Image (cartoon, grey):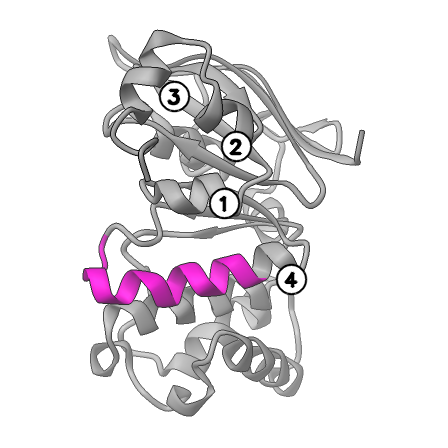
Amino acid sequence: MGETILQINHLSKAFGANVVLRDIDFTVEKGDVTSIIGASGSGKSTLLRCINLLETPTSGEILYHNQNVAGRKVKAAEYRSHVGMVFQSFNLFNNMTVLENCMVGQIKVLKKHKDEARQSALYYLQKVGMAPYINAKPRQISGGQKQRVAIARALAMEPEVLLFDEPTSALDPEMVGEVLTVMQKLAQEGMTMLVVTHEMAFARDVSTRVVYMNQGVICEQGTPEAIFGNPQRQETRDFLSRFRQQ
């Protein structure tokens, strides 16, 4: 057993009478790359938003190093500096340059000096192949490039865990590969990642764990070999049937 970073216990989320998540349990250990798969509307993105405290769970616990962050007294901004998030729609500041987008969180949340924030931003932009575009505004770069900037921005906060909410779903098909390549490299370097994705090849080939969700519950979880090679539940088999020939 490795070091447990996140532990989700009996997590549920309802919006009024609409129950979106029911009794979710799983753990994230240091170095894990966990892919959360399932049909649209199965609660995957809501789960990620609860883990990042963008949504407040209706019940249950989110333990970060054994501390329940779902409680009222948690400083969400400080917690999010440890558990970063990459959104499907990039969420870059359009009035800032690429470089400024990667500096602002470090200065405001981590209280870094501007020079230190700039150095860190440049390092991570180089890492994702976006160093030539530091003076560009988001409107001047492609979707794939925006997402790589968003990943650099999240990395610049030096989080312990990175959450990815369908990071390729807003991209044109030819741009998907450039983002997945960056994510694969991060996985190889040991970054702890929790990825909501429709990219089954990534889930199968890059993940250390796969969680299959259906209608707000976890139907099955395990290694990629177990989930893709020998799924135990009929729902999982039905969902994966179109991918298993690949």
The part of the chain drawn in magenta is 170-185
Residue at numbered disc 2? 224
Disc 2 and disc 3: Cα gap in Å?
14 Å
Residue depth check, mark 2 versus mark 3: number of the one nearer the observer:
2
Residue at numbered disc 4? 158
Please give the label number shown on residue 205: 1
Measuring from the top left, give residue 214's x and y in whole percent: 33, 17
Where is 62 relative to 220, above or below?
below
Measuring from the top left, give residue 36's x and y in whole percent: 44, 32
On the question of residue 195 being in view, the answer is no
Measuring from the top left, give residue 6's x and y in whole percent: 65, 32
Side of 135 where 41 appears, left or right? left
Q: Are marks 1 and 2 in contact (CB under 8 Å)?
A: yes
1 or 4: tag closer to the N-terminus? 4
Residue at numbered disc 3? 213
2 or 3: tag closer to the N-terminus? 3
Q: Quadrant of the N terminus?
A: top right
Q: Are marks 2 and 3 in contact (CB under 8 Å)?
A: no
Disc 1 and disc 2: Cα gap in Å?
7 Å
SS of the residue under disc 2: helix
1 or 3: tag closer to the N-terminus? 1
Disc 1 and disc 3: Cα gap in Å?
19 Å
SS of the residue under disc 3: strand
4 or 2: tag closer to the N-terminus? 4
Residue depth check, mark 1 versus mark 3: number of the one nearer the observer:
1
Side of 229 where 6 appears, left or right? right
At 54% from the left and 23% from the top, the residue drawn is: 226
Crowding around mark 2 (Cα neighbors within 10 Å: few <14, some 14 to 19, many 20+) is many
Q: Give the residue type that dot 4 points to.
A: Glu
